[in-house]
Image (spheres, rainbow, N blue to C red):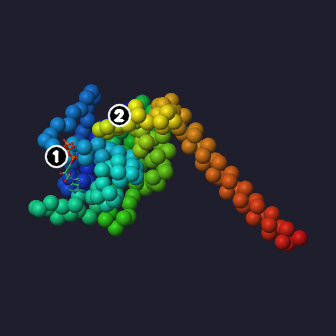
Amino acid sequence: MQIKSLEIQGFKSFPDKVKLTFDQGITAVVGPNGSGKSNIVDAVRWVFGEQSTKTLRGSRMEDVIFGGTAKRKPQGSAMVNLVLDNSDRLLPVDSDEISITRKLYRSGESEYRLGGASVRLKDIYELFMDTGLGRDGYSVIGQGRIAEIISSRSSERREIFEEAAGISKYRYRRGEAQRRLDAAEENMLRLRDILSELE
Ligand code: ATP
């Protein structure tokens, strides 16, 4: 699956709308230190629903919104839109292209869109699970991540292989099913209490 384009506005060091298009093959982003190369990678992570401010190299989520410079006023919101090629139908969506958008306002209000329709973070997370692309995917490898993987515990390393093997979604669904079962059991208990009170 290939990223076709990335549109950024108000995100980190990009106050104005910038659109990057990616062709077949390798794309290299070059520029002086501090020019915003890593911010582009942060934008990719963020649009897939990254929630860790540490991973995004900030201390609060608001830090992803352009904070202003000596010459420019801060922005009120950050927006990232990513378009993926889905002509191979790797994702179960009947469309050649998939567009995901995330927007965050300074007020804390945020929104996710999938092909224009408003969705929940959970929908984005579930769609990209086991593709290696999503929030916990291995396709974005940051600085120091290789050393981190090598020195991590075997159980943590296993998660990477599980994502690649397409097992993560089953683990996730099992967890969800277990949570629903626990809730149903709790409801049954309450029901039994009420019944015994009535008898
Ligand atoms: P290096 O080559 O040193 O790794 P880089 O090109 O990857 O650098 P980035 O880390 O992407 O650079 O960008 C850092 C720049 O982004 C800094 O100048 C920082 O001030 C700016 N920046 C980060 N967050 C914001 C924000 N919210 N508002 C404005 N500028 C920001």
Q: Tell me if I can see residue 93 in this picture.
A: no
Amino acid carrying mark 2 in the image: Ala
State the residue at coordinates (50%, 44%): 126
Is ligand 1 closer than 8 angstroms to the Cβ of mark 1?
Answer: yes
> In the image, residue 97 lies at what x, y percent?
37, 39
Amino acid carrying mark 1 in the image: Ser
* Front-most of residues 106 and 95: 106
| Count of numbered circles on the image | 2
Q: CA distance from mark 1 to mark 2?
A: 25 Å
Circle 1 sits in a helix, a strand or a loop, which is it? loop
User: Can you identify the residue that label 1 sits on?
Assistant: 35
Label 1: how many residues lie within 10 Å, few (<14), some (14-19) or many (20+)? Answer: few
Position of 76 relative to 84 (above/below)? below
State the residue at coordinates (20%, 46%): 36
| Image quarter (top left, top right, bottom left or bottom right) of the C terminus | bottom right
User: Can you identify the residue that label 2 sits on?
Assistant: 147
State the residue at coordinates (26%, 35%): 22
Q: Residue furthest bottom?
A: 198
> In the image, residue 78 lies at what x, y percent?
29, 57
Q: Quadrant of residue 21?
A: top left
State the residue at coordinates (31%, 60%): 62
Closer to viewer: mark 1 or mark 2: 2
